[in-house]
């Protein structure tokens, strides 16, 4: 049995769906991949409530400072979190409201139904 091939600009009277450019799709996939790690999701959850230092995050997640720092580095490189220094202390926060919204929508999705 052969599958029908469609070469039309409109399928069923509807325009073809838009597609993402490859580079954009790859960046988005990397972001979702970063959020596929439970530890990073827990860090995002904590930072969605307030700005935290590594010590606060390590205590809240019951992990070592070095393990938290490693995860924060990944999140920072992907621009999911940002940091600011205050003397010797470094405080982390979500990079912007988009990260908060992404986290909240994902949480609502899994809690729905």
Image (cartoon, rainbow, N blue to C red):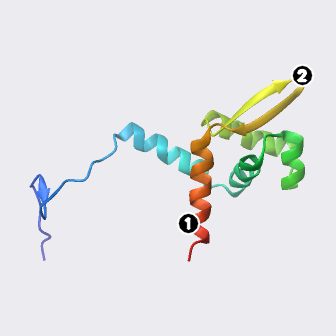
The disc, 1 or 2, on the residue closer to the chain's N-terminal end is 2
Q: Residue at x 81, y 34 (%)?
A: 91
Q: Residue 63: x percent and y percent?
A: 86, 52
User: Which label sits on residue 80?
Assistant: none
x%, y% of residue 71? 73, 43
The answer to whether residue 16 shows anywhere in this view is: yes
Toward which corner of the image does residue 96 lie, by quadrant? top right
The C terminus lies in quadrant: bottom right
**Residue 81 on image: x %, y %:** 68, 38
Which quarter of the image is occupied by the N terminus?
bottom left
Q: Are marks 1 and 2 in contact (CB under 8 Å)?
A: no
Q: Quadrant of residue 56?
A: top right
Left or right of 37? Residue 92 is right
Query: Mark 1 to mark 2: distance in Å?
Result: 40 Å
Indicate the secondary structure of the residue bearing disc 1.
helix
Q: Residue furthest left?
A: 8
Position of residue 86 relative to residue 31, above or below, is above
Residue behind mark 1: 109
Seen as rendered, the residue at the extreme top is 87
Q: Is residue 87 left or right of residue 103?
A: right
Q: Residue 53, image x and y in percent?
A: 84, 38
Residue toward you, 107 or 60: 107
The label shown at residue 87 is: 2
**Horizontal arrangement in the rendering, residue 63 relative to residue 5 (left or right):** right
Q: Nearer the viewer, residue 34 or 60?
A: 60
Residue 73 lies, with reference to residue 37, above or below; the image says: above
Q: Quick one: SS at disc 2?
A: loop
- How busy is the neighbourhood of tag 2: few (under 14 within 10 Å), some, or many (20 plus)? few
Asked if residue 44 lies left or right of residue 103, the reply is right
Mark 1 Cα-neighbour bin, 10 Å: few <14, some 14–19, many ≥20: few
Can you see residue 64? no
Q: Residue at x 84, y 47 (%)?
A: 57
């Amino acid at each position: 049995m052969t599958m029908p091939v469609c070469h039309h600009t409109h399928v069923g009277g509807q325009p073809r769906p838009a597609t993402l450019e490859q580079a954009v799709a790859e960046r988005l996939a990397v972001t979702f991949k970063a959020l596929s790690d439970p530890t990073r999701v827990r860090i995002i959850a904590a930072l969605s409530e307030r700005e935290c230092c590594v010590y606060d995050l390590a205590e809240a997640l019951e992990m070592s400072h070095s393990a938290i720092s490693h995860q924060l580095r990944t999140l920072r490189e992907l621009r999911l979190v940002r940091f600011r220094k205050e003397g010797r202390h470094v405080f982390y926060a979500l990079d912007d409201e988009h990260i908060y919204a992404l986290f909240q929508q994902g949480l609502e999705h899994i809690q729905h139904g």
